[in-house]
């Protein structure tokens, strides 16, 4: 899965260090996202002969190394053996050999035997990765007190929590807001809550198939806010064309009708709206995550006329693994551009520059160092206050390979150096890092970072052994320097996070959504949405 790598169930990580053209035209793949069960890697897998492969006598590792590096760099950057433990490589290699022959174009492994691949990677890989317990700042914060405010939900339709997206938005014209809108990819429900009336809980809006992402738009320009939804179409990882983009058009005070805009897509992880061609109508860009062979980045040009909804589909890249597509002006020319966070072994941040009239030029802004990097989230913001838009990125996806604690997982800052050049800085190592948000949490005038952990395959005993919190606040204490402060939460099942001042008291509230991919008595009783308050020391509650 992965979103989630999609849940995405979510999403993953590294990229070709080649031209954007090669990056966006070359299919690449990562480990399988199994149905709803967490894959167990390293179990015996059949080492089938590869048709057309070298079948001569086995060769020594020094002889093999240049051959394997060339062979295993056809679709993505070469994966160093030390990026995964020995037990994970056999399943990975079986998958990669199958996909190499099935890809378009085919890249068969003609120069190496399968058993040579297994010998090379399992000999050079470590028994286990050097993953140490997570460590917070040496001294607890004296500026912020973190308190749990409320929990919503639990299960819907008899399923474990499946919260794929939480978003604050001013949805209702007769309420000052903001309202909290929630999508549940397991039950299919889209819901809302009034943060100023938490006792009312989550209220149902409408039910789709497996909604993954929701945005507020006034698509028909009638003065009422609508919703646009990316729907996976299935909770299981698949290349079937089950996904869709759905417009929830307002028909009344709290009522909507479903209008499909694009159907028979792969699993849709994200959809964003902007007037990309300058004709006054909102167009859409779609992250069709797919799985291995399905998947694309899609531009939907709004050709609607009075009384008729019509969108023209323009594929921008045929590639699986796009997680999200934040819209922003990358080059300062006043036109909306967007950035694609691509996983599934590509592991890249790719900018799409709007050249006008619905045309885009793509450019790799930064690429992860290996194809199991595990990209999982991105947030734009001017982190250092220099007037240029930076990005905070997380690489914490583990659903594909089942290796839950990787020492290279964590939170990074892509500093904008100008002219679309970005430099990576480590903010902090954090297992399962997901869903970054940027906010001035402590009110000191600079921007901080808040991140969740999503480790659906790791049981809580192992999470606690690693001293791993479910949410971390990275306080920026000087330019580019961050200290890590944990929330009092040890459930690492949060693929989505929102942050904002929901009650007007000047304090930031943090809202997390939870997904449990394995049913258990605990998961069936757990909350689907939690709200936390980051109370600045000395601040008081607002009058109710």
Image (tube, rainbow, N blue to C red):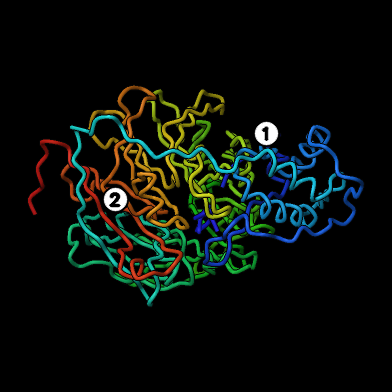
Q: Where is residue 272 in the image (x, y as percent from the top left)?
A: 49, 52
**449 vs 99, nearest the viewer:** 99
The part of the image, by quadrant, that contains residue 263 is bottom right
Q: Position of residue 452 (x, y in %)?
A: 38, 47
The furthest residue to the left: 543
Mark 1 sits on what residue? 17
Q: Where is residue 441 in the image (x, y as percent from the top left)?
A: 26, 37
Q: How far apart in space, not on screen, are marks 1 and 2 (Cα)? A: 38 Å
**369 vs 267, nearest the viewer:** 369
* Residue 216 in view in this figure: no
Left or right of 464, for residue 375: right
Residue under the point 48% across and 39% down? 131
Disc 1 secondary structure class: loop
- Could you say which disc has been placed on residue 489 in the image? 2
Q: Are marks 1 and 2 in contact (CB under 8 Å)?
A: no
Instruction: Give the crowd class for mark 2: few <14, some 14-19, many >=20 residues within 10 Å.
Output: few
| Residue 191 versus residue 138 in the image, above or below | below
Q: Quarter holding the C terminus?
A: bottom left
**195 vs 457, nearest the viewer:** 457
The part of the image, by quadrant, that contains residue 474 is top left
Left or right of 96, for residue 31: left
Instruction: Give the crowd class for mark 1: few <14, some 14-19, many >=20 residues within 10 Å.
Output: some
Left or right of 148, for residue 267: right
């Amino acid at each position: 899965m992965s979103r989630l790598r999609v849940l995405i169930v979510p999403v993953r990580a590294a990229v070709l260090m080649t031209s954007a053209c090669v990056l966006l035209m070359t299919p690449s793949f990562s480990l399988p996202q199994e149905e709803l069960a967490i894959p167990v890697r390293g179990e015996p897998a059949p080492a089938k002969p590869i048709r057309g492969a070298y079948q001569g006598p086995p060769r020594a590792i020094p002889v093999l190394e240049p051959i394997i590096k060339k062979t295993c760099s056809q679709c993505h950057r070469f994966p160093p053996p030390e990026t995964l433990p020995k037990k994970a490589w056999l399943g990975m290699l079986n998958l990669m050999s199958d996909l190499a022959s099935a890809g378009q174009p085919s890249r068969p492994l003609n120069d190496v035997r399968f058993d040579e691949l297994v010998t090379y990677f399992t000999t050079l890989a470590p028994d286990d990765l050097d993953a140490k317990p997570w460590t917070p700042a040496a001294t607890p914060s004296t500026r912020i007190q973190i308190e749990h405010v409320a929990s919503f939900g639990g299960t819907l339709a008899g399923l474990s929590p499946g919260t794929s997206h939480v978003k604050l938005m001013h949805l209702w014209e007769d309420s000052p807001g903001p309202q909290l809108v929630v999508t549940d990819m397991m039950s299919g429900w889209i819901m809302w809550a009034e943060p100023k009336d938490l006792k009312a809980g989550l209220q149902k809006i409408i039910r789709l198939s497996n909604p993954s992402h929701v945005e507020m738009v006034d698509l028909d320009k009638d003065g009422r806010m609508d919703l646009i939804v990316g729907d996976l179409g299935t909770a299981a990882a698949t290349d079937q064309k089950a996904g869709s983009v759905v417009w929830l058009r307002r028909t009344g005070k709290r009522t909507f009708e479903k209008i499909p805009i694009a159907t028979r897509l792969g699993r849709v992880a994200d959809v964003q709206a902007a007037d990309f061609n300058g004709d006054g109508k909102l167009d859409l860009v779609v992250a069709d995550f797919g799985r291995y062979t399905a998947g694309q980045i899609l531009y939907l040009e709004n050709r609607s006329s009075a009384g008729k909804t019509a969108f023209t589909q323009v594929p921008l890249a045929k590639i699986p693994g796009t997680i999200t597509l934040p819209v922003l002006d990358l080059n300062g020319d006043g036109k909306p551009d967007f950035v694609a966070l691509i996983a599934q072994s590509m592991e890249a941040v790719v900018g799409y520059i709007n050249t006008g009239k619905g045309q885009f030029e793509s450019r790799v802004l930064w690429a992860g160092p290996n194809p199991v990097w595990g990209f999982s989230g991105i947030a734009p913001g001017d982190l250092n206050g220099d007037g240029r838009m930076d990005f905070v990125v997380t690489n914490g996806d583990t659903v594909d390979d089942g290796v839950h604690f990787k020492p290279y997982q964590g939170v990074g800052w892509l500093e904008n150096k100008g002219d679309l050049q970005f430099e990576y800085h480590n903010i902090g190592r954090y297992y399962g890092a997901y869903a970054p948000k940027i906010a001035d949490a402590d009110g000191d005038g600079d921007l901080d970072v808040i991140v969740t952990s999503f480790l659906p395959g790791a049981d809580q005993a192992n999470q606690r052994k690693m001293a791993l919190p479910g949410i971390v606040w990275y306080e920026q204490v000087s330019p580019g320097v961050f200290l890590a402060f944990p929330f009092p939460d040890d459930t690492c099942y949060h693929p989505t996070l929102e942050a904002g001042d929901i009650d007007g008291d000047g304090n930031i509230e943090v809202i997390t959504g939870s997904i449990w991919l394995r049913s258990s008595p605990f998961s069936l009783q757990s909350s689907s949405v939690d709200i936390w308050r980051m109370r600045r020391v000395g601040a008081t509650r607002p009058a109710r």
